[in-house]
């Protein structure tokens, strides 16, 4: 539909670090549970293995007011439209993006529902955690990096949806910024 609805409610920032306020929008007409999506985002971002590591930052979900950014669950077509506004083509690999020239971090509903071959169907939760951490990582200023040690966990900022094998170095799927925490 291309039209969005904010997920109602507030999830207070649990930590003391630099606070990031975000809103969750879900495209109207998607048959995915918006409340569960919002809960998954909040839990993932505030996990100690995520960007909130060691109290560095904390994330608060709001449904009104002025957010720092808007995490948006949308159809592949709508995701493609919003990513194109920032010069990104997500249509070839059907992926998500941080539409940096807008306030939206776009999460592709197809990927949210189906995951990717790199993680496999048994690791859908881990894939979703990676997706959130990776795209919000871009919003926080982090660029893509690749794994440099064969058999190691891939960095969360590697394009893990596309491949775990970069320049002949094969790594393991990893949803976390700080996986050892």
Image (cartoon, helix red, strand yellow):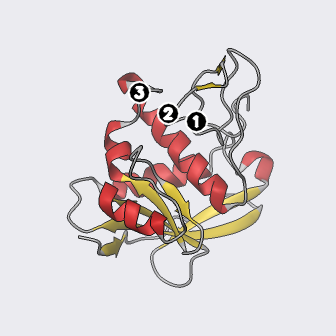
Q: CA distance from mark 3 to mark 1?
A: 14 Å
Give whichever of 8, 158 is nearer the camera.
158
Residue 13 visible, this orientation: no
Q: CA distance from mark 2 to mark 1?
A: 6 Å
| Residue linked to disc 1 | 175
SS at badge 2: helix
The C terminus - image quarter: top right
Label 3 neighbour load within 10 Å: few <14, some 14-19, many 20+: few
Q: Quadrant of residue 82?
A: bottom left
Tell me which numbered mark, 2 or 1, is placed earlier along the sequence.
2
| Residue linked to disc 2 | 126
**Pair 3/1: label in front:** 3
| Residue linked to disc 3 | 117
Residue 11: where, in percent of width, then height? 51, 64
Residue 161: where, in percent of width, then height? 49, 37
Q: CA distance from mark 3 to mark 2?
A: 13 Å
- At a point 32% along the width and 74% down the height, the residue shown is 5
Label 1 neighbour load within 10 Å: few <14, some 14-19, many 20+: many
- At a point 53% along the width and 49% down the height, the residue shown is 132
- In the rendered view, tell whether residue 157 sits above or below residue 29: above
CB within 8 Å, label 2 to label 1:
yes
- In the rendered view, tell whether residue 101 sits above or below residue 76: below
**Pair 3/2: label in front:** 3
Q: Quadrant of residue 19?
A: bottom right
SS at badge 1: loop
Q: How many marks?
A: 3
Tell me which numbered mark, 3 or 1, is placed earlier along the sequence.
3
SS at badge 3: loop
Give whichever of 102, 67 is nearer the camera.
102
- Is residue 77 toward the left or the right of residue 128 in the image? left
């Amino acid at each position: 539909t291309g039209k969005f609805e904010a997920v109602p409610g507030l999830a207070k920032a649990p930590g003391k670090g630099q606070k990031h306020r975000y809103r969750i929008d879900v495209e109207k007409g998607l048959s995915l549970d918006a409340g569960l999506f919002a809960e998954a985002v909040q839990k993932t971002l505030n996990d100690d293995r995520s960007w909130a590591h060691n109290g560095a930052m904390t994330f608060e979900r709001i449904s009104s007011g002025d957010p720092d950014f808007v995490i948006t669950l949308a159809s592949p077509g709508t995701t493609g439209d919003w990513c194109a506004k920032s010069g990104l083509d997500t249509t070839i690999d059907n992926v998500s993006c941080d539409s940096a020239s807008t306030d939206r971090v776009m999460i592709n509903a197809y990927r949210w529902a189906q995951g990717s071959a790199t993680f496999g169907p048994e690791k859908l939760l881990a894939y979703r955690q990676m997706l959130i951490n990776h795209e919000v990582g871009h919003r926080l200023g982090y660029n893509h990096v690749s794994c440099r040690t064969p058999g190691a966990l891939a960095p969360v900022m590697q394009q893990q949806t596309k491949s775990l094998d970069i320049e002949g170095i094969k790594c393991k799927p990893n949803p976390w910024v700080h996986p050892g925490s």
